[in-house]
């Protein structure tokens, strides 16, 4: 069975500081994708960053970067220079490459607060 | 220019009613999905369609019936609504094996059953 675990239900960061959100996963597949989605109060699901498991290089998107540790099955998200607009729920998600199309397995989410 | 659009955004209805949520994507994707987010914000896939064919059908009551008239549309019809159906329903689409299998979500349809 595939699972995604986010062990931090809530996190808080000071504006302009850096915060890291944790995610671990379990899958028996060797090829898969990992994602971080952001969900602000509007409820829209916004893709933050994506990582292909076969790529050793950690993905980065502006202030967002990941620390992908394949052997440890860990996929943490680092947000640098935090902004008030970063406050949201963040979901880590796993999709197997060759499995059921589109079956994103989500973690339970981490609620991030940003203090001015 | 909305990529994945769904209507209505908000829906309040009584138990026992039948309702539909419509979804359209203009991304040219072959695959569309319905996801459900419950009151605890847990997201789970309900259905997946590829080129109008059902690919994934998770353990969803048969009161829920997806309909895909073409690959750009995937509507969700719900019969005999129950209180437990209250949730946010997300339509999504992707083009497998392109763009890293990224799934693009609509804005969600917030269903409240009273």
Image (spheres, rainbow, N blue to C red):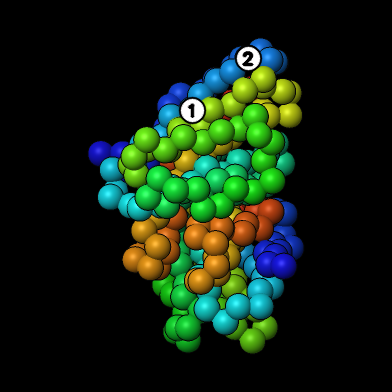
Residue ID for mark 2: B17
Q: How many numbered marks does the figure carry?
A: 2
Q: In this view, does B10 lie above or below A32?
A: above
Q: How would you rate the neighbour count of disc 1 (Cα within 10 Å): few for under 14, some for 14-19, many for 20 or more?
A: many
* x and y percentages locating residue A23 in the rendered image: 65, 68
Indicate which disc residue B21 carries.
1
Given residues B103 and A10, the one toward you in this image is: B103
Q: How would you rate the neighbour count of disc 2 (Cα within 10 Å): few for under 14, some for 14-19, many for 20 or more?
A: few
Are discs 1 and 2 less than 8 Å apart at CB? no
Residue at the (55%, 46%) spot, across then down: B47
To which chain does the residue with label 2 belong? B
Given residues A40 and B19, the one toward you in this image is: B19
* x and y percentages locating residue B79 in the rendered image: 62, 23
Residue at the (35%, 65%) spot, across then down: B99
**Helix, strand, or loop for circle 2?**
loop
Q: Is residue B6 visible?
A: yes
Residue at the (54%, 28%) spot, across then down: B77
Residue at the (72%, 23%) spot, across then down: B82
Quadrant including the C terminus of chain B: top right
Apparent side of residue A110 relative to residue A36 in the rendered image (left or right): right
Given residues B53 and B58, the one toward you in this image is: B53
Q: Is residue A24 above or below residue B68?
A: below
Q: Is residue B47 above or below residue A97?
A: above
To which chain does the residue with label 1 belong? B
**Helix, strand, or loop for circle 1?**
strand
């Amino acid at each position: 069975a595939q699972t995604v675990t986010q062990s931090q239900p809530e996190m808080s960061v000071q504006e302009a500081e850096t915060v890291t959100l944790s995610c671990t996963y379990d899958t028996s597949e060797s090829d898969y994708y990992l994602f971080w989605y952001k969900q602000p109060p509007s409820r829209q699901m916004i893709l933050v960053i994506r990582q292909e498991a076969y790529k050793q290089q950690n993905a980065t998107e502006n202030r967002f970067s990941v620390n992908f540790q394949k052997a440890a099955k860990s996929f943490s998200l680092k947000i640098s220079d935090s902004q008030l607009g970063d406050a949201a729920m963040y979901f880590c998600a796993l999709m197997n490459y060759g499995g059921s199309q589109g079956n994103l397995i989500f973690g339970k989410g981490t609620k991030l607060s940003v203090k001015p | 220019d909305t990529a994945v659009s769904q209507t209505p955004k908000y829906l309040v209805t009584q138990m026992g009613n039948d309702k539909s949520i419509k979804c359209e994507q203009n991304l040219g994707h072959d695959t569309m999905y319905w996801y459900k987010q419950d009151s605890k914000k847990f997201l789970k896939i309900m259905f997946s369609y590829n080129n109008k064919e059902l690919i994934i059908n998770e353990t969803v009551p048969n009161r829920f019936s997806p309909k895909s008239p073409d690959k750009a549309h995937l509507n969700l019809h719900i019969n005999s609504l129950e209180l437990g159906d209250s949730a946010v329903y997300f339509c999504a689409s992707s083009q497998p094996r392109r763009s890293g299998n990224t799934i693009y979500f609509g804005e969600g349809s917030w269903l409240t059953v009273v």
